[in-house]
């Protein structure tokens, strides 16, 4: 090999490294500005939540009823603006924090259960569903930090 060939190979390697560093750096900045992709899947959520419910709640709620409660929860989140339609490669644009109150959510789900014909024998069952579903959101990375008390 000649000296010019070796210099050309070294120069080519340096150019490839610089191009790769620029592209990777640009993509890293772009991905940092995009909301993380937390994927909520109904059947996975039903299974995850059902496994974490107390035995008494598992005995009183069927999987179909649990599925309907989780759907109602997701509709409520959508109405509150926490489940937007277009989230792929969307920049994080939350101007002010939105606090989700478990008590309000439980009351909403009790009303939805009655509207959907789900016979909730004990109101605490809905509270357990809410707690487990929020824990599922945390497990998949779909929840922000806990709000400080005002």
Image (cartoon, rainbow, N blue to C red):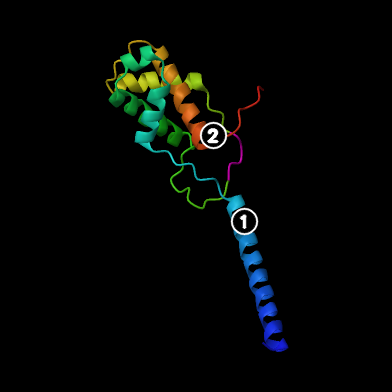
Magenta stretch holds residue 137? no
Q: Give the residue number, with chain letter if any, for mark 2.
A: 143
Nearer to us in this view, 124 or 81: 124
Q: Position of residue 56 (x, y in %)?
A: 37, 12
Q: Earlier in the sequence, mark 2 or mark 1?
A: 1
Q: In which quarter of the view is residue 94 placed?
A: top right
Residue placed at 61% from the left, 41% from the top? 95
Mark 2 or 1: in front is 1
Q: Position of residue 103 (x, y in %)?
A: 49, 18
Left or right: residue 71 versus residue 1 is: left
Nearer to us in this view, 135 or 122: 135
Vertical position of residue 24 compared to residue 146: above or below: below
Residue placed at 61% from the left, 32% from the top? 145
Vertical position of residue 32 compared to residue 122: above or below: below
Mark 1, residues whose alpha carbon is within 10 Å: few (<14), some, or many (≥20)? few
Left or right: residue 3 versus residue 108 is: right
Residue placed at 65% from the left, 60% from the top? 25
Vertical position of residue 16 compared to residue 118: above or below: below
Mark 2, residues whose alpha carbon is within 10 Å: few (<14), some, or many (≥20)? some
Which of the image's four quarters has the C terminus?
A: top right
Left or right: residue 147 versus residue 79 is: right
Q: Can residue 107 be seen?
A: no
Give the structural element (helix, strand or loop) at label 1: helix
Q: Give the residue number, with chain letter if any, for mark 1.
A: 28
Vertical position of residue 103 compared to residue 134: above or below: above
Prevailing SS of the magenta stretch: loop
Residue stretch in magenta: 93-97
Tally the numbered discs.
Answer: 2
Residue placed at 49% from the left, 32% from the top? 137
Q: Position of residue 55 (x, y in %)?
A: 38, 14
């Amino acid at each position: 090999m000649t000296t010019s060939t070796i210099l050309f190979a070294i120069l080519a390697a340096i150019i490839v490294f610089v191009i790769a560093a620029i592209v990777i750096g640009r993509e890293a900045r772009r991905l940092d500005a995009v909301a993380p992709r937390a994927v909520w899947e109904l059947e996975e959520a039903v299974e995850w939540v059902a496994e974490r419910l107390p035995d008494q709640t598992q005995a009183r709620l069927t999987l179909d009823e649990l599925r309907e409660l989780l759907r109602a929860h997701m509709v409520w989140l959508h109405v509150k603006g926490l489940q937007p339609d277009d989230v792929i490669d969307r920049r994080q644009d939350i101007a002010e924090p939105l606090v989700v109150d478990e008590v309000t959510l439980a009351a909403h789900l009790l009303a939805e259960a009655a509207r959907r014909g789900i016979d909730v024998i004990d109101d605490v069952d809905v509270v357990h569903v809410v707690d487990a579903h929020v824990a599922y959101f945390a497990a998949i990375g779909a929840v922000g930090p806990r709000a400080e008390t005002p």
